[in-house]
Amino acid sequence: MTSDLRFVIVLMMVVSLTWGILAIPRLRQRLPKIYLIARSWWLMLAALCACYVIAKITDDSQALPSPTYPYQWLLIAFFVLIGLRGGYEIRRIWCPQSKSMLIEKLQARGLQPITLPFMQPPSHSTQAYTRLNLLDLLFSVAFIALVVSLIGLQQLIWQRAQYGVLFFVLFASQFNDIAQYLCGRFLGHKLFKRGLAPTISPNKSIEGALFGSMLAAVLATLLGLWLTPFSWWVCLLAAYGLAVSGIAGDLLESAFKRQHGIKDTGTMLAGHGGVLDRVDSLLIGVPLFTLFYWLLG
């Protein structure tokens, strides 16, 4: 069994065990939000891993020098669905009526305060869509580049038979989210009184970004040594680059949401928000990694 498939099995076992423990009634009552986050994680990873495993099935009926993968379109379809859902969330935010409905839904679920310091006053304009500015265009281009890069990266990985690279890239960014949260929670504002970007994301601290990115880079490097053919210094450089770019992508999405006066881009993923909230750390890092992987691979 290859290392990437072993990783998939271990990953699903760990996430399933975590969700199962949090599903215990007593823990579920004490940690309802953590339970919802674990459930959403399980559903997202189950869909991704299922598409990945099926996409790796080879067609042995034809005597070809290199294996063929007749089902890899399933993984491409998974990325396309992410793009379609994210595009729908962007369109909903651009439409004043749809955005008002989203805000009401978030407020009804306790996910957004009735008033926020950055919220704009309700608009009574009859325009179908708001006038776009540079930030809207930048965020939209970044999201389109992400979806195209995911599809292109998958094709390059399959051609080079370096399948573990996909999980390395995706989880290097996700490690950064978790590490930033933990470091920010325990070390936040103890060394630096000023936040990382107080006008965009007041809860982010410099300590969380600094130490979280370093911790995420170390964890992702260990994962890269297991899953990829890269040397340790390439894994470390790529992991740290993905961690730092993940912070930039997170701030870009935060600025986009703050401009439109919303806390989350949707309610599809309980505990996470919308699809855009889940892939924000990939917005800049994945396109850059795909470019370098294509040019230098």
Image: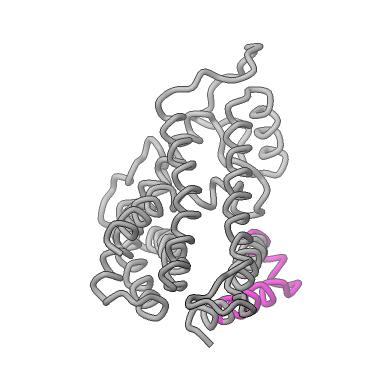
Q: Is residue 51 left or right of residue 212?
A: right
- Residue at horizontal 58%, vertical 69%? 69
User: Magenta segment, principal secondary structure?
Assistant: helix
Observer-nearest of 27 and 56: 56
The quarter of the picture where the C terminus appears is: bottom left
Residue 155 image point, x, y percent: 47, 60
Residue 245 horizontal/vertical position (percent): 34, 52
Q: Residue furthest right?
A: 25
User: Along the line of sight, which residue is nearer the eye, 196 or 47?
Assistant: 47
Residue 122: which quarter of the image?
top right
**Residue at (32% x, 46% y) in the render:** 196
Check the image and name the residue furthest to the bottom. Answer: 1
Residue 1 lies, with reference to residue 90, above or below; the image says: below
Residue 58, position in %: x, y? Answer: 59, 76
Instruction: Specify whether residue 292 is painted magenta.
Output: no
Q: Is residue 94 left or right of residue 208?
A: right
